[in-house]
Amino acid sequence: MPAKSHSQKNKRKQQQTINKMAKSQMHGHIMDHAKMTFVELQQFRIPDSVMHQISAIHNSAIISKLETAIWEWILRYLLSKPRKNQGALSNSEKTNFNAALQAAISAGTYSTTAAIHAANHMMHSFMGFKGTLRFLAWHRAYLYEMEQLLQSYNTGVTIPYWDWANDHTLPSWVILPTGVTRGPDTSYTLPSQSDINNQVLNQTGYIQFTQNLEGFHNTVHMWVGGNTMPYPSLSPHDPMFWLHHANVDRIWAQWQSAHPGVNPPLSGTDATMDPWSLTVTDVIDTFNLWYYYV
Ligand SMILES: [Cu+2]
């Protein structure tokens, strides 16, 4: 996609965000995720120079009249970064993403994060019904953890998504760690966008929606093939995992915007995306995790 259409999409997204904010003010409540202090903001590797400006503006007379929580929510929006279609990345964006991956691979932090997927955190349907309910929320937290790791090597990178329903070509530009192989295994068939529309996005109930999406997601793992992607205990060792899951996550975000307030029915310990402390409430809004899709 050309850069122009991205910026138009951004504009539209900005307008949607402003409308959403206006609505939440009208209803007299503030979204939970906005309840964040500046000390908490500092955890997210915001450069000191930016933090100083934020504090200065926040302390100014005009801004202090705004609800602090709304102001902080605006900051989250302003500081969030776009996750882009991998097919629309420039060569330097691809190079930067691969370099951040390579830095994490060399430091050993990549494989530590990849290994988390080998344990049972009740995050897939084959692990049980709670796995069905946690699949999208858990993987959104997982993507966030990897994105934070990559940004510790290069603050500018985000995880691109591979839109496998519309682009049936494996994005082979993504680096492979030593010893990892990749297909494609064309004995499997990638879904089309009409499959996604008819069987996933058109679902009105969360459970049917996530089950069908997870089913197509499984097929994509098999299609990518090689010696890691088809195997849940190994799949994140191929960095293609993140581009694939960013697309799954993007489809969830699309469905969420059409079904506001319809969330995974999780409570108690099931609502915490272990081994992290993020809860399902924390991951409902992508802006709470500093990203959005373009
Ligand atoms: Cu998984």
Image (spheres, rainbow, N blue to C red):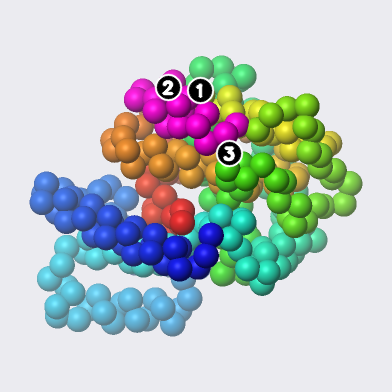
Left or right of 109? Residue 256 is left
Q: Is residue 61 left or right of residue 275?
A: left
Q: Which residues are magenta?
A: 191-209
The question of residue 204 being in magenta is answered with yes
Q: Which residue is mark 3?
A: 165
Label located before the other in sequence (3 or 2): 3
Magenta stretch: dominant secondary structure: helix
Which mark's residue is nearer the viewer, 3 or 2? 3
Whether 243 is drawn above or below 2: the answer is above
Q: Residue at x 35, y 32 (%)?
A: 263
Q: Which mark is residue 211?
A: 1
The dot on residue 207 is 2
- The reply to whether the C-beta atoms of the residues labelled 2 and 1 are less than 8 Å apart is yes
Q: Quadrant of residue 180?
A: top right
Q: Residue furthest top?
A: 128
Residue 265: give x, y in percent of width and height: 37, 25
The secondary element bearing badge 1 is classed as helix
Residue 176 position within the rendered picture, expressed as x and y whole percent measured from the top left: 80, 52
